Image (spheres, rainbow, N blue to C red):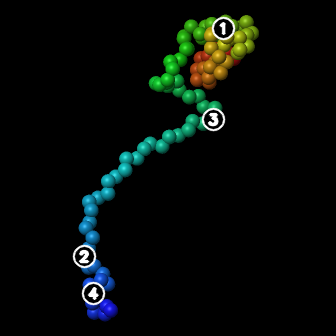
């Protein structure tokens, strides 16, 4: 039976723990901000499939719009889908002004 005078197992270590160097700092990432709903996003495509857009589409779309063609007909004439034409209208202000 152990007595209170026996400090072999129940003693608290009087040694101080080793002090490590300064903590490594974490690199902070820049916060991403979402564009406001309906905001015009810049044309910035560095990955993925290249765009089918050609500068000549602007004049061709303008002439078809003067004839009263719908977006479906203009998309068909340019050889793209309607969602593609809609995306171009959101991204390109010049096309948006031509088709108004």
The disc at residue 77 is 1
Asked if residue 48 can be seen in this view, the reply is: yes
Q: Earlier in the sequence, mark 4 or mark 3?
A: 4
Q: Within 10 Å of the Cα at label 4, are there few (<14), some (14-19), or many (20+) other Cα atoms?
A: few
The answer to whether marks 4 and 3 mark residues whose Cβ atoms lie closer than 8 Å is: no
The disc at residue 7 is 4
The residue sitting at the front extreme is 1
Asked whether, in this view, residue 92 is left or right of residue 99, the answer is left
Q: Determine which quarter of the picture holds residue 80.
A: top right
- Cα separation between marks 4 and 2: 15 Å
Which of the two residues, 2 or 46, is positioned nearer the viewer here?
2
Q: Earlier in the sequence, mark 2 or mark 1?
A: 2
Assign a secondary structure to mark 1.
helix
The residue carrying mark 3 is 37
Residue occupying the point 26% across, 73% down: 16
Q: Earlier in the sequence, mark 4 or mark 2?
A: 4
Q: Which label sits in the foreground, 3 or 1?
A: 1
Q: Determine which quarter of the picture holds residue 15.
A: bottom left
Residue occupying the point 59% across, 10% down: 57
Q: Earlier in the sequence, mark 1 or mark 4?
A: 4
The residue carrying mark 2 is 15
Where in the figure is residue 65, as x and y percent of width and height?
Answer: 70, 10
Q: How many badges with numbers are in the image?
A: 4
Assign a secondary structure to mark 2.
loop
Q: Within 10 Å of the Cα at label 1, are there few (<14), some (14-19), or many (20+) other Cα atoms?
A: some
Assign a secondary structure to mark 3.
loop
């Amino acid at each position: 039976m152990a007595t209170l005078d026996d400090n072999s197992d129940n003693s608290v270590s009087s040694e101080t723990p080793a002090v490590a160097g300064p903590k490594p700092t974490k690199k902070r990432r820049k916060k991403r901000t979402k564009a406001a709903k309906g905001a015009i996003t810049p044309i910035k495509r560095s990955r993925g499939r290249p765009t089918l857009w050609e500068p000549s589409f602007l004049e061709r779309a303008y002439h078809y719009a003067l004839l009263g063609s719908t977006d479906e007909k203009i998309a068909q004439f340019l050889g793209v889908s309607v969602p593609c034409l809609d995306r171009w209208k959101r991204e390109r202000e010049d096309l948006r002004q031509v088709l108004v």
